[in-house]
Amino acid sequence: MLELRGLLGFVLFILCVWAIFQIIKSRAEDLHKAIWIGVIVFLPLLGLIVWWFFGPKPEN
């Protein structure tokens, strides 16, 4: 069971890093980027879910 939690924690970490890079690449203002990054850092799972639906989209 410990290995599964460790694997899920690692996957969550990778998703957070990916989301932060997507936020940095977005067209949002710097203040909004900082707020979104703070939300993801301090509330990883909830922050990712909220960002996925409402966060800034990356530039193509």
Image (cartoon, rainbow, N blue to C red):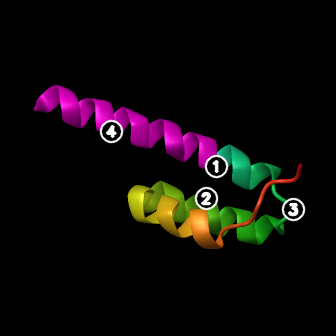
Residue 4 rendering spot, x and y as whole percentages: 20, 32
Q: Residue at x 89, y 49 (%)?
A: 60
* Residue drawn at (51%, 43%) of the image: 15
Query: Could you tell me how far apart the alpha carbons at marks 4 and 1 are, in whole angstroms?
Result: 16 Å
Residue receiving disc 3: 27
Reading the image, the residue beneath label 4 is: 9
Is 24 left or right of 3, judged from the image as shown?
right
Q: Helix, strand or loop at disc 1? A: helix
Earlier sequence position, callout 3 versus callout 4: 4
Tell me which segment is drawn in magenta: 1-19
Mark 1 to mark 2: distance in Å? 6 Å
The local secondary structure at tag 2 comes to helix
Q: Disc 4 or 1, which lies upstream in sequence?
A: 4
- The residue at the point 33 percent across, 38 percent down is 9
Instruction: Find the distance from the CA under tag 3 to the CA under tag 4.
Output: 29 Å
Residue 20 tag number:
1
- Which amino acid does the dot numbered 2 rest on? Ile
Point 10% across, 32% down: residue: 1
Q: Look at the numbered disc 3 and give the secondary structure of its residue.
A: loop
Whichever of callouts 1 and 3 sits on the residue coming sooner in the sequence is: 1
Mark 4 vs mark 2, foreground winner is: 4
